[in-house]
Image (spheres, helix red, strand yellow):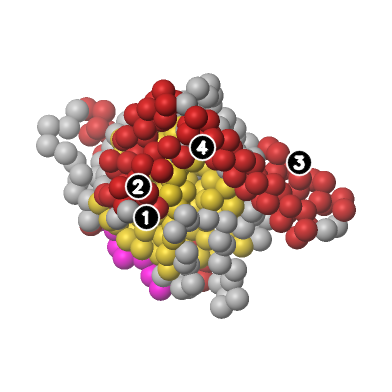
């Protein structure tokens, strides 16, 4: 099959939910440290977990939950494909709607013919207030993925520079002892990106990146917007900010040996009074932020073993967490592209 024909079929077969209503799904409650508290995505999964707890068959029930969600995604995909094939106007609308996704994929080394658009998300905001708060959002909670590209414009406003926003993926949906991956952005120093692996509720992997090293356009200031993308393929996870490759995580490798001392935040020329105050606040919080990063790394190294499970599939969503004060994470122009090869 030629690349052109494959490309045409992808445009016909994509899943898109352009008529979905805009809704915000965020919540917050007093929780333990961030790496112990990030919750799963789906309320339906929570019900399944509750049911399995009484039955005692945890592995079987959890496997059933993920299999059911995956099956639902396959049915939606097949149905949308059939409708698009029969309906030329629908096919045209679909091709038009996904055009921005198709145009962006090559920035991450992805051929649009290698998968399909699983969803395009309306803007959603997670608003948290207080200490150790966590919230999540996703309008398409039943969609699971193993290999994928997930991207969003993230706009943040955080009182504490250690508070942040990001993605969770390949989650097993366990509310009490989740196994999942998280890519988390905070404003520590000039901006920090952490890859976090959790197994049975424990932090077992931690990789640290400072986007400004590769992405000179990265903006740490409050109310700024950065485009964050994650490409997961097998055991490799590539991380991007504003279209620039920041680093790669090999899921089979142990946590980083250490965290390089981060660059100090830089005050932009002509900064406003608000940005200047934010800059001064960042400087005062810098040492505390570094201590937190090192603490997370220590936890991961203590819990890591060579038998740590590599997660291959699961639920996805947006995550926000607040160390103190008010944290607002807004996700816009977000989409999920599922890779088939």
Residue at 37 percent of width and 58 percent of height = 238
Residue visible at 47% across and 55% down in the picture:
340
Distance (Cα) linking label 1 and label 2: 7 Å
Element under label 2?
helix
Q: Which residue is mark 2?
A: 5
Q: Earlier in the sequence, mark 1 or mark 4?
A: 1
Element type where label 3 sits in the image: helix
- Asked whether the residues under the numbered discs 1 and 2 touch, taking CB atoms below 8 Å apart as contact, a structural biologist would say yes
What label does residue 257 carry, if any? none
Measured as percent of width and height from the top left, residue 12 is found at 43, 37
Mark toward the start of the polypeptide (3 vs 2): 2
| Disc assigned to residue 81 | 4
- Residue 1 magenta-drawn? no
Judge by depth and name the residue closer to the eye, 70 or 114.
114
Q: Residues within 10 Å of mark 4 (few under 14, many from 20)?
A: many
Label 3: how many Cα within 10 Å (few below 14, some 14–19, many 20+): few
**Image coords of residue 341 (percent x, y):** 44, 59
Pointer 3: what residue?
Answer: 47
Label 2 neighbourhood size at 10 Å, few (<14), some (14-19), many (20+)? Answer: few
Question: Could you say whether the residue bearing mark 4 is in a helix, strand or loop?
Answer: helix
Instruction: Name the side, left or right, on which 62 lies relative to 29.
Output: right
Prevalent SS, magenta region: loop
Q: Say which residue appears at 28% left-offset and 41% top-offset.
A: 103
- Can residue 283 be seen in this snapshot? no
Q: Which residues are magenta?
A: 257-264
Q: Nearer the viewer, residue 86 or 77?
A: 86
Separation of residues labelled 2 and 4 (CA atoms): 15 Å
Disc nearer the start of the sequence (1/3)? 1
Q: Which residue is mark 1?
A: 1
Give percent across and percent down for residue 120: 44, 34
State which quadrant residue 246 falls in.
Answer: bottom left
Q: Is residue 259 magenta?
A: yes
């Amino acid at each position: 099959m030629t690349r052109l024909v494959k490309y045409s079929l992808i445009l016909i077969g994509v899943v898109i939910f352009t008529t979905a209503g805009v809704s915000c799904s965020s919540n917050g409650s007093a929780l333990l440290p961030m790496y112990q508290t990030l919750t799963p995505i789906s309320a339906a999964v929570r019900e399944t977990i509750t049911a399995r707890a009484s039955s005692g068959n945890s592995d079987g029930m959890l496997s059933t939950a993920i299999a059911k969600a995956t099956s639902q995604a396959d049915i939606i995909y097949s149905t949308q494909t059939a409708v698009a094939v029969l309906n030329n106007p629908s096919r045209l609308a679909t091709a038009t709607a996904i055009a921005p996704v198709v145009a962006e994929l090559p920035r991450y080394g992805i051929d649009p013919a290698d998968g399909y658009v699983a969803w395009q998300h309306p803007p959603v905001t997670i608003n948290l207030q207080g200490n150790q708060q966590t919230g999540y959002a996703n309008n398409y909670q039943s969609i699971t993925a193993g290999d994928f590209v997930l991207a969003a414009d993230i706009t943040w406003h955080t009182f504490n520079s250690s508070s942040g926003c990001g993605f969770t993926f390949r989650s097993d949906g366990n509310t009490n002892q989740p196994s999942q991956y998280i890519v988390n952005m905070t404003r520590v120093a000039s901006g920090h990106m952490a890859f976090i692996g959790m197994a049975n509720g424990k932090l077992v992997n931690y990789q640290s990146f400072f986007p400004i090293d590769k992405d000179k356009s990265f903006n740490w200031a409050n109310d700024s917007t950065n485009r964050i993308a994650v490409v997961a393929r097998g055991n490799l996870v590539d991380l991007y900010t504003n279209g620039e490759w920041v680093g790669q995580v090999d899921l089979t490798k142990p946590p980083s040996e250490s965290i390089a001392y981060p660059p100090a935040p830089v005050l932009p020329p002509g900064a406003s009074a608000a940005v200047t105050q934010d800059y001064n606040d960042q400087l005062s919080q810098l040492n505390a932020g570094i201590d937190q990063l090192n603490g997370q790394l220590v936890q991961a190294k203590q819990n890591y073993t060579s038998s740590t499970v590599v997660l291959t599939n699961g639920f996805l969503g947006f995550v926000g967490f607040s160390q103190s004060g008010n944290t607002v994470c807004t996700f816009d122009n977000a989409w999920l592209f599922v890779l088939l090869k």
